[in-house]
Image (cartoon, rainbow, N blue to C red):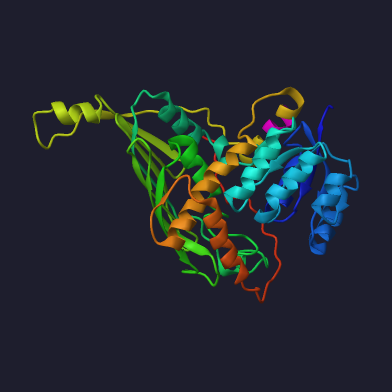
């Protein structure tokens, strides 16, 4: 094939943005062949805004079975992600899944198993991995040149959302429709980056506050303590209720400290390892000598378009993906562990009891309320994620 014929399942906030990127020619190896949405209002939007060549379906299953696509992008509410991806594989289609990979790890594990039995390309929309700042952090941490991680702190409280946002869909911010709040909707990118750069924690203690700042039934304020296998510790703080909020990601290594804030990355390098200095220094208060290091990156930050380009290039020419689909379970493991810890009121080891998690989730789903005063609105996502392209 010369171009990948893509079908987008779910043309809400994210799906409609992906339609625009493809139609504007930002993904040269891809053409928009079809879209699907359960809502008539969104299908009407498609009829009014998309070319006549784009076929419109009432649901993802019909689109997948139509034979008009080579690949699908699943951008539906979260519970449907694994099922639709597996359905795509069953029909010989490649699949790109929006975040999160699913709502619970047991569900995503089944999807990963299906992926292992097909030769189709499977990718996750982890667009923040395209950000040159996070790629540089990954490079420095994984080089091993600066020793092991000692401490990780990420305060990510600039995910501000209004009550109008939560009122914009009947599924939003409900246990039965979405399966979680800030951890499952806004933070999959952050949790993916945290484990991608720093590795998976082995234990989590979390405090998830339900509807603290909004009239919702899921968490909108979280503080979590993390323990890593090598002895490092961390803190992860997030909310959709702070304005202006903060986004500061710190990684302390044995020979330096990385700080990412406001799309800027700084690095302070120690002349000797702190661990060596601690036991050889003769003074009691003097810190080990060090200096700021000027970092240079390639400045590229293509975000969603970068993931789409890589997905098409992998299908056509075998070029690398930004994130393999199977990796989606990692960040979800973190959010599931945080939820379970908060529900149980105690630390949770990773891996955790997936059956117990699902039992607790299903109890919440059973009592999930039907939202009133829902005003179906599709918001533009432009500017809601980092897009600056600058060299540090």
Residue nearest the viewer, comparing 91 with 37: 91
Residue nearest the viewer, comparing 29 with 206: 206
Quarter residue 380 falls in? bottom right
Where residue 60 appears, as percent x and y from the top left, is: 80, 51
Where residue 105 appears, as percent x and y from the top left, is: 58, 48
Q: Is residue 262 above or below residue 43?
A: above
The count of marks equals 0
Where residue 200 appears, as percent x and y from the top left, is: 45, 40
Residue nearest the viewer, comparing 329 with 190: 329
Identify the image quadrant of the C terminus: top left
Residue 70 visible in the snapshot? yes
Image-based side of 276 in relation to 296, left or right: left
For the magenta stretch, what is the residue range? 309-313
Residue nearest the viewer, comparing 90 with 160: 90
- Which residue ends up furthest to the bottom in the rendered image? 372
Residue drawn at x 84%, y 48% as measured from the top left: 63
Identify the image quadrant of the N terminus: top right
Residue drawn at x 51%, y 35% as measured from the top left: 390
Where residue 168 appears, as percent x and y from the top left, is: 66, 66
């Amino acid at each position: 094939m010369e171009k990948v014929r893509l079908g987008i399942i779910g043309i809400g906030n994210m799906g409609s943005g992906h339609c625009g990127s493809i139609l504007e020619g930002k993904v040269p190896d891809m053409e928009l062949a079809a879209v699907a949405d359960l809502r008539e209002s969104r299908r009407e939007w498609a009829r009014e805004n998309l070319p006549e060549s784009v076929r419109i379906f009432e649901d993802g299953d019909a689109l997948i079975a139509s034979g008009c696509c080579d690949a699908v992008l699943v951008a539906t509410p979260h519970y449907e992600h694994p099922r639709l991806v597996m359905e795509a594989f069953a029909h010989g289609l490649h699949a790109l899944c929006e975040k999160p990979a699913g709502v619970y790890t047991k569900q995503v594990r089944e999807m990963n198993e299906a992926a292992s039995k097909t030769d189709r390309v499977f990718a996750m929309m982890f667009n923040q991995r395209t950000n040159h700042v996070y790629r540089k952090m990954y490079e420095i941490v994984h080089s091993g040149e600066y020793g092991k991680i000692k401490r990780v702190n990420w305060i990510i409280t600039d995910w501000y959302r209004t009550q109008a946002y939560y009122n914009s869909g009947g599924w939003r911010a409900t246990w039965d429709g979405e399966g979680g709040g800030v951890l499952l909707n806004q933070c999959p990118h952050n949790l993916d980056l945290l484990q991608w750069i720093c590795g998976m924690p082995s234990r989590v203690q979390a405090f998830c506050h339900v509807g603290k700042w909004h009239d919702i039934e899921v968490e909108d304020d979280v503080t979590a303590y993390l323990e890593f296998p090598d002895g490092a510790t961390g803190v992860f703080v997030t909310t959709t209720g702070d304005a202006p909020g903060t986004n500061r990601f710190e990684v302390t290594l044995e020979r330096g400290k990385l700080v990412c804030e406001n799309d800027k990355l700084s690095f302070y390098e120690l002349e000797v390892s702190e661990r060596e200095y601690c036991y050889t220094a003769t003074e009691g208060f003097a810190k080990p000598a060090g200096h700021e290091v000027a970092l240079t990156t390639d400045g590229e930050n293509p975000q969603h378009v970068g993931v789409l380009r890589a997905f098409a290039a992998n299908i056509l020419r075998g070029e690398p993906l930004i994130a393999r689909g199977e990796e989606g379970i990692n960040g979800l493991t973190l959010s599931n562990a945080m939820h379970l810890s908060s529900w149980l009121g105690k630390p949770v080891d990773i891996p955790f009891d997936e059956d117990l998690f699902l039992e607790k989730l299903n109890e919440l789903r059973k009592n999930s309320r039907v939202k009133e005063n829902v005003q179906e609105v599709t918001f533009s996502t432009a500017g809601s994620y980092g897009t600056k392209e600058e060299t540090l």
